[in-house]
Image (cartoon, rainbow, N blue to C red):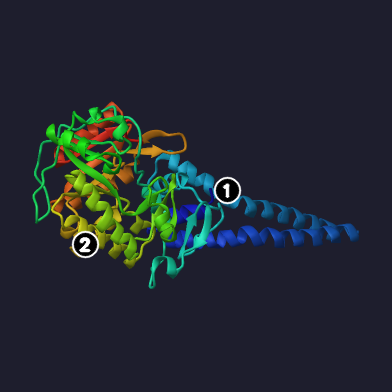
Amino acid sequence: MQILDLVSVCGNHAIVPILAVFVRALDILHIIAPILLLVGLGINIFKLVKFNDAKEEKQLRKKITNQVVATVVIFLLPYVVNLLMWAISQGGLSVFDVADCWDKAKNTTFASSTSYKKPGSTYRDGTLVKITDDEIGEGSDDVDPNKIYKEKEKARQAKRNNSSSNSSNNSFGSSSDNYSIESSYGVFLGLDHDDGINKLLNYKLVVIDLQEFNKDDIDKLHEKGIKVYSYLNIGSVEEYRNYYNRFKDYYLGTYENWEDERWVDVSKKSFQDFIINELEPSLRNKGADGYFIDNCDVYANFKNDKIYNGLKTILRSVHSHNLPVLINGGDEFVSKAIKDGSYNSLFDGVNQEEVFTVINFNNHTYKNQSASETKYYKDYLKNVKSKGLIVYLLEYGASSSKEKEIANYCNENGFSYYNSSSYNLD
């Protein structure tokens, strides 16, 4: 990984404008300087061979030595800087949040280790490409796909080994409705009809993908007094969905770590109409008690007013049916909606992943979240709570000691959480 990737990942840090100038200069120097030095070196070697004057020979040897050293130093300088960044991150220092940026950069896939991402471009299937106005709509802002550093790792299939927190049933909600938080909360997005519903019976509120269940399944859960929130993906489309090819002209790029999923341009009216008039009603008719909205992060990855307003159009319609709406992830979208005051008409709460834990997709393991990211999410959730919104947490592979910390945090704030043994939830 090159330092240029570090700049791309940490583009929101105050040090970056200075670092970016240094990086650009270093990048040019790294290519041009060795070439110029090698040309000069060749000329001096030629002179050394041609002339026999002892004094001039001594001066030429000194010049050649200096040129060789300078060439090696300039060529290796970027790697030395990267090594320094790694050493800082290992040492746990927080100067300018460099360690945190490095940690994010290590977990980000880049198309090229030396490519500096230009505004208006994104990574598609491992290739840096241009996003045109036709794809996003006229008047688009700069696209910043590297904001995927939050890397909301939405889940599909796996097992659950620990259930919910002991947090009390504090009542929160929007100004229009007052929904209560459920302490017995479970997320099972990978479960389907063939798996049955037995795993869901120990919970008061479950999140499942109602597209994979029938109405009889939901009726049985309701008979047990279980609330059912349906997964509803409004920012991307998975290849296995029967409507995947229907919107292939609207796809903006591949979802990182989920190769079978594509970000979608939510500003397109036909896609909005599909969610509003076809998909959501079908879930409501099956008995959905609420919605678990996924991939509002499309706004963070393709930051554009049309994308933002497209999400609002869809959410406003979904929310109009007086069913609670949770936004999974989507912190930048949520924060903007809170700031402009539109949140009350869009959603009633959030489900935030990876506040205390984080997924390592390289080896499918789990580790504790970085202190700076945990702080970021805590500050974000404090703001969400201050608006009277419900808050749930979704964690992955938390150890017993880490889960105790999560439970204490949720108890103190009136939140609830679900700790999964895998990033796949079944």
Residue picked out by circle 2? 339
Residue 222 visible in the displayed image: yes
Q: Amino acid at mark 1?
A: Tyr
Residue 398 visible in the displayed image: no
Disc 1 from disc 2: Cα separation: 42 Å
121 vs 156, left or right, is right
Q: Which mark is residue 26?
A: none
Which residue shows up at 31% across the image and 28% down it?
A: 399
203 vs 75, left or right, is left
Instruction: Examine the rendered structure and indicate whether residue 85 appears above or below residue 263.
Output: above
Instruction: Examine the rendered structure and indicate whether residue 421 appears above or below residue 373.
Output: above
Horizontal and vertical percent for residue 224? 13, 31
Q: Which one is closest to the eye, mark 1 or mark 2?
A: 2
Residue picked out by circle 1? 79
Q: Quadrant of residue 180?
A: top left
Horizontal and vertical percent for residue 215? 21, 40
Q: Quadrant of residue 27?
A: bottom right
The C terminus - image quarter: top left
Dot 1: what SS? helix
Mark 1 residue crowding within 10 angstroms, few (<14) / some (14–19) / many (20+): some
Horizontal and vertical percent for residue 189? 30, 39
In the foreground, 166 or 377: 166
In the foreground, 238 or 330: 238
In the foreground, 286 or 25: 286
Instruction: Examine the rendered structure and indicate whether residue 37 appears above or below residue 166.
Output: below
